[in-house]
Image (spheres, grey):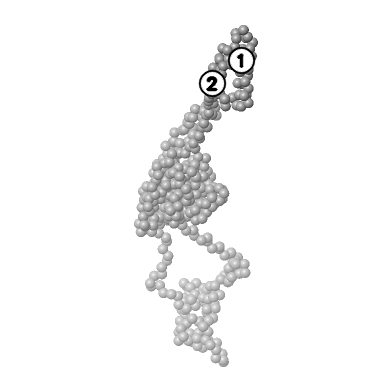
Amino acid sequence: MRIKQVPAGARADDSAACVRSSLPSSRPWATALLTSAIVIGGIAPAMALPQDFWSDDVFYEPAPPPRPVLHRRHKAPRAKVKETVAPARKPQRPLIVAVSIRNQSLKVYDANGLFAEAPVSTGMAGHATPLGIFSVIQKNKWHRSNIYSGAPMPYMQRLTWSGIAMHAGALPGYPASHGCIRMPTHFATQIWNWTRMGARVVVTSGEVSPVAFSHPLLITQKPAPPADTVPSADARPATPAALINAAIDSARGTDAAATAIAIDLKDLRPSLTPHSGDATEPTTTGLAAGDKPTKVADASATLAQTTAPATLTDGATATPGSDAAPEAVATPPAPKRTGPIAVFISGKDGRLYARQNFEPLFDVPITIAPSDRPLGTHVFTAQRDGDKADTFRWSAMSMPVEARAKTVSHHAAKRRQDIGAIDTEPAPTADSATEALDRLTIPAETMTRLAEALTSGSSIIVSDQALDRSETGQGTDFIVPLR
């Protein structure tokens, strides 16, 4: 058998063909054996290594799909409110701070109108800043939160004891706080120095501003205090002789108008004075040094016994010669409070509440004329009219009525929620500020008490809400929530 030599580099298929052609056709078994040897010899080495190492075929395995990138959704930043540079002058009180949730802005109004403005960051979803009427009830320059792990709240001005305040903080351009009102640090330091305890703060969804207002029910002229009795020029001071005459009349039990006993000191003779052999110093009587010694000392003693009440051990007083039982000394009146007063008129309670220095002053029932419309919520603030201390003018702020979710059945609400629909009731039309005051009838004595206590910064709030619905309590002014 001759085997044809295969040149180097020739393919295995060509060598196999040459071998087959050289074999005699009479031996088919030899052909099969040779073919099997070639096949087995070519496959055996391939089994020792990975198949793709010897194969010319390229296998492509599809790559796994990329993981979706979840982008954190942020609300689009609102139009930034530029901070208004406050003028060099100090604000003229009283101040009113108005916060707009929709515009993320804060405006400060003084007696002359808009004074300053700055951007803010209010409560985020789940920690919304409450809407309503508040006032500054505490100030702390270096305060730390007692709710959120001691988070710093510099230049804090508290609005409620439940954790709502104004303070310096970060402003990302959208609501991001836990309910507080964050302000730029520079502006927070300024408004810290402008405000005083009790400064009015109003938080609304839109924007509201105080406007000049007048109404017959709002007092513009403070009543003058009663003039003290001034002695006339002709009235002369009581002389010692007159006091002695009064003492003698009282001792004798006679009527001074019927029996006049004129005693002239110069007519008293020295012979009336008890004589003593030893020279003694004259008794001090309060008379001039040139007067002669008289019995003034005895008369003064009689005057003291007649006019001066005796003090008892238990604090009671008794007059000599009287059989009346001793009366206890009247306790001194409480010191009169000072500072602006705050008045809250509740349409639901039908009462007028007055507070001063965050403490209840008095409350009385009032009459409210019925109507098919609610009173609404209005704030009236008094401020001194120019340089006149007893003349006032007023400003008014009417709070917007917020639409509320419509009350429907559970199944209907679930079905509407599945499709993303929200039903709201139309906001009722409330009375204007003038119409609300026209419906009130306040007793005259109450108006007199309010007029006597009226000062610049005093306020009157008229609302349909009840007092117990708010957070008004010890150490607070009237808090009126709007939602």
Check disc 2 and report its element: helix, strand or loop: loop
**In front of the other: 264 or 61:** 61
Q: Position of residue 148 (x, y in %)?
A: 55, 48
Q: Position of residue 206 (x, y in %)?
A: 42, 41
**Residue tagged 2:** 7
Give the class, few, some or many, for how many residues have Cα within 10 Å of label 1's Cα (few <14, many ≥20).
Answer: some
Is residue 142 in view from this perspective?
yes
Q: Residue at image x 48%, y 49%? A: 169
**In front of the other: 17 or 447:** 17
Q: Residue at image x 56%, y 15%? A: 18
Check disc 1 and report its element: helix, strand or loop: helix
Q: Position of residue 467 (x, y in %)?
A: 51, 45
**In front of the other: 212 or 173:** 173
User: Could you tell whether 366 is left or right of 47 in the image?
Assistant: left
Q: In the image as oriented, which residue stretches furthest toward the bottom? A: 277
Q: Which mark is residue 178?
A: none
Mark 1 residue type:
Thr
**Residue tagged 1:** 35
Q: Residue at image x 45%, y 52%? A: 185
